[in-house]
Image: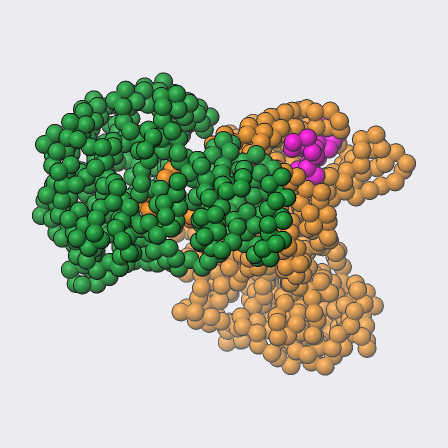
Amino acid sequence: MDPRHIRNFSIIAHIDHGKSTLADRILERTGTVAARDMAPQLLDSMDLERERGITIKAQAVRLTWTYEGQEYELNLIDTPGHVDFTYEVSRALAACEGALLVVDAAQGVEAQTLANLYLALEHDLTIIPVINKIDLPNAEVERVREELIEVGVDGIEALAVSAKKGIGIDEVLAAVVTRVPPPRGPRDAPLRALVFDSRFDSYKGVLVFVRVMDGGVGVGDKIRFMSTGKEFEVSEVGVFRPELTPISALEAGEVGYVAAAIKTVEETRVGDTITKAANPARESLPGYRPAQPMVFSGLYPVESSDYGRLREALEKLKLNDAALVFEPETSAALGFGFRAGFLGLLHLEVVQERLEREYGLTLITTAPNVVYEVHLVGGQILRVDNPSLMPVAGDILSILEPVVESSIITPAEYIGQVMELAQERRGDYQGLTYLDPKRAMLNYRLPLGEIMFDFFDQLKSRTHGYASFDYQPSGMAAAALVKMDILLNGEPVDALSTIVHRDRAYAKGKALAAKLKELIPRQMFEVPIQAAIGSKVIARETVRAMRKDVLAKCYGGDITRKRKLLEKQKEGKRRMKSVGSVEIPQEAFMAILRVEDV
Amino acid sequence: MEPRLDAWGVYVHVPFCPRRCTYCDFAIAVGKSAEERERYVQAVLGEWQTEKLPAGEPLAVYLGGGTPSMLSPAQVEQILQAIRLRSGGLGVEVTLEVNPETVDPERLRGFRRAGVTRISIGAQALQDHHLAAMHRGHRAADVALTVTWARAAGFDSISVDAIYGWPGQTLGEWQETVRGIVAINPDHLSLYQLQVEPATALSRMMKAQILQPVDLDLTADMADWAESYLIAEGYDRYEISSYARPGHSGQLNRLYWTMNAYVAVGMGAHSFNGTRRWWNVRAFPEYLARISAGHDPEDGAESLPREAQMREYAWLGLRTVQGFSRSRFYDRFGQDPIEAFLPVWLNLNQNGLLAWNTDRIWLQPRGLDLANQVMAALIDAAVMPPVSPLASSLRRANLER
């Protein structure tokens, strides 16, 4: 198609502002999907995504829409809706010329709205503000227009829409056609196609989702991935309508997929540039960076005989998840397992849940941690992604931890509570801006390790659900960190070691020991729990020995019932990990996450 | 010591209750009329006529509930008569479970005349506020009265049940209960640690925090105190939760622990014939409907392969304080149980839970406290293959040294 009749656009929004519903309406209105085939939120194709109501992987759909007698090809590129996947969002946006910025008419501009907006502006996208949910009784369209103006968007031009009720959808489509510029890019130049996502298909190999910037690509072409130099022969190109639809070629300006018998998504890195082997482009497209795991956790099978199955399962997940990294690891306590790196906590939870649900594994996941940069006395620098591998204190000159730049938008009356929370989490105050007299944005530099777990929950509870939060990584910073070990029955349990800030080590140690006492059931003998820094014990608790464990007589000869109770007891045991002679339930390894704020 | 391998028992389930106790999740039927009770008795008699019986006279008969003392003496007599007619006798002991509020001297004399030799009284506690919270139908004072009447009616053996670990129960109250029961001199006591079963009123009250969970150490103190007190009072602890004067252990319950056969009739009743267990439908109308249509009331069954029988024999046998006999096990399965589960026994022995000698395997005091741990180790234990007789006897000699 003539590039003048192509429009590539995304929808960006704060969570729950109605992005998926708007996408659904657009698919319906353009006849891409018949209304009767609509599963709610069609673009979120993984079950997990639908259950959690979030988009994990981006998708791209080609729509056809006739405007004033002219047929247009509209490519809707959906973006992941979670801060773990900011880089993926940025690549998806780089594949577009415009974006619909959806804002809830009752909630107004939120932190994620801004983060996505700035990301889109960085890529020079045309922004079409869409005020959604205007059917709500508490909708305040005018106030939201003003907020949009405050943050630098032309609020007057904002479309008033109710995706739920199907109001204003034609206007949205018209705005996409008239306001988003058509793609530019020479079709006769050497091929440059931006990889913005990929998916494993068991028949075709990896489907690489691309936006062709320059040139074109067709079946039989030999292509090269510019970051790795790997070459493949194209077996199919096509578009999503939303089902896979092969076409003969993708030209500059178009969005679609390329299949080339590629075995793992790892070879098709998001942000990479595809060119042709025969006539390569001189430079790759800007902005590529390899996936950077931010959060690390040990994954161990409860049954050590499941180690092989766990490896196979991880390898299979890896086929479709380039951001997942893992390597074998041995724990004195847990045996053989893997240290895996994730984009964030959500990514970790998704992987863990898929391993348990789709592969039937029972896992012990150790408390997630960030990666530390350790400067040793000898001048050497170590990357430590497992707390138990932290060198002894005497060898360490300094420890650096990853930090993020965050923005928190809150009603003005909760500023005090938000600042208090940020201080507790070792936040470094950067600034305060009022969006309007009632809402303010706070900027803090925060250690990533302090916001991974329950920061957002805390923020929500302290602001009665009103605050929103977003962040982006901002390098490493030195901090007074120490390794805290946990000893059970006098033996250190490496999988329970954590890195904590020196000033709060005592309180954390005490709280963690108390939590473990609560989580570890009584055993046949007494189990002392100690928290220690180096050789110094800073907290101690005791799980007392089990005194009685008996069942009453079996009633009326019903032996089966008694047996079932014993089997249940046994099953509970099976879900525990024997470390030395102590049986530890799965959740104890995550105890540090459940320690109340101290 | 243990019953013969071919000894068997009869259990009759009588589901009627004036009300449901808050902790109860048994197969019971509340609020049935006299006419419905009579229809049930006729159905039980019908089922009994169709049961396949082991050879010979049963060792013991047990009418459990529910509240069997809600039947009339005539109905009890009719049931016992039917059992006697088909199997040639009623054995050494005929037990009837009794709730104090359902009996008077007249009815108790009637039950005795009908052939009942032993009664088991559900006292549960001797504090009226706890009885009310349990939703029991009697008061503390009724228990002694019932025992007095039962003695007068001429019962050979009287058992009393009590529950410990009830929410809010103090050690002092428990001592009061046990002392109060001992003061009326029963021949047998069953002391049950409260178990909060799902879907009972009790579990709902605990969830709603109307009743507070019970401290495990306090419960353990109650059990320990009762054990030493009862032993001092001349009772023998012969099973984990049962105490008896010499010669008064419950005969039918013993058959369960020795894996003997028992024929059970009535709704929800569980039977066992040595290799197969089966159980009846649990709902009152369905049980009646099946019997009156001439259908089998069986709701489910399982056949135990030899190895499962061996495992079950072992963990059931360990519920009795004297444990079980290796030679009786050998007679039944053709293999020494020590050899069959050697790794389990060694492990339990190392942990101070279990011991054995040339003929018996039994739980040590710590093993009785943690019986579930022992039994859980056995329920899926691998059965070691039999070794040659010579190797076996050599190993046995070694182990016993």
At horizontal 60% and vertical 37% (from top left) the residue drawn is: B350
Residue A99 rendering spot, x and y as whole percentages = 59, 58
Q: Which chain is green?
A: B
Give the vertical position of A501 relative to A212 (above or below): above
In the image, A550 versus A536, the foreground residue is: A550
Q: Does the image show residue A109?
A: no
At horizontal 32% and vertical 33% (from top left) the residue drawn is: B247
Residue A578 forms part of the magenta stretch = no
How is the model colour-coded? by chain
* B131 with respect to A131 (left or right): left
Q: Colour of chain A?
A: orange
* A349 with respect to B220 (left or right): right
* B247 with respect to B96 (left or right): right
In the image, B294 versus B228, the foreground residue is: B228
Q: Residue furthest right?
A: A378
Region of the chain picked out in magenta, as a range: A480-503
Total marks placed: 0
In the image, B401 versus B155, the foreground residue is: B401
